[in-house]
Amino acid sequence: QLAESGGDSVQAGGSLKLSCAVSGAEARIRDYCMGWFRQTPGKEREAVAAVGMDGGTAYTEPVKGRFTISQDNAENILYLHMDNVKPEDTALYSCAATGPFCGMTGTQTLVNLGRIDHADWGQGTQVTVSS
């Protein structure tokens, strides 16, 4: 099970840290490929950041240099650090995971995770950025 938190309303230029807590009898996030996605009404879901089995990370172009994905393997938490946020970052942010032992790099996870039917998803946390 995945549970996101940390969404909030923030002014442009500010920062947020989203968390995705992973639970379950076999949950060890270091064995999974995981990612953050975002969606706004009327638009397709967008992959934002991902981390692969090799620990490599990947980001969609609009967030490069501003967002950082990280994970705490001991606590089974995936994070998304969001700096210098912009109004266009406003969205419902969700985390997803597939595995264990998914075999994908960070870039492959960014591209493919949203297409995997059996991936696990959280309910999402809302981020609103005002100008």
Image (cartoon, rainbow, N blue to C red):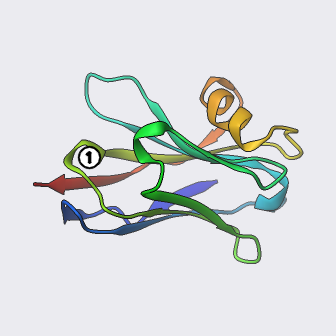
The residue under the point 22% across, 53% down is 128
User: Residue 38 in the image: x percent, y percent?
Assistant: 41, 40
State whether residue 123 appears in this view: no
Q: Who is closer to the viewer here, 33 or 55?
A: 55
Image coordinates of residue 89 in percent, x first then y, are 30, 46
Quarter in which the C terminus is drawn: bottom left
Give the residue displayed 71% in from the left and 30% down from the top. 118
Residue 75 x %, y %: 70, 76
Q: Quadrant of residue 101?
A: top right
The quarter of the displayed image where residue 43 is located: top left
Whole-percent x, y for residue 79 in the image: 55, 64
What residue sits 81% from the left and 43% below the top?
A: 99
Other-residue count near label 1 (Cα within 10 Å), few / some / many at <14 / 14–19 / ≥20:
some
**Residue at disc 1, secondary structure:** loop
Residue at point 60%, 29% (across, down): 114
Q: Which residue does the numbered mark 1 point to in the structure image?
A: 90
Q: Which residue in the rendered view is the most extreme toward the left?
A: 131
Left or right: 76 in relation to 45: right
Reply above or below: 129 against 11. Answer: above
The answer to whether residue 48 is left or right of residue 129 is right
Residue 8 falls in image quadrant: bottom left
Residue lying farthest bottom? 74
Q: Position of 90 compared to 77: left or right?
A: left
Instruction: Please tell me whether residue 90 is drawn above or below residue 80 in the rendered image.
Output: above
Is residue 56 visible to us here? yes
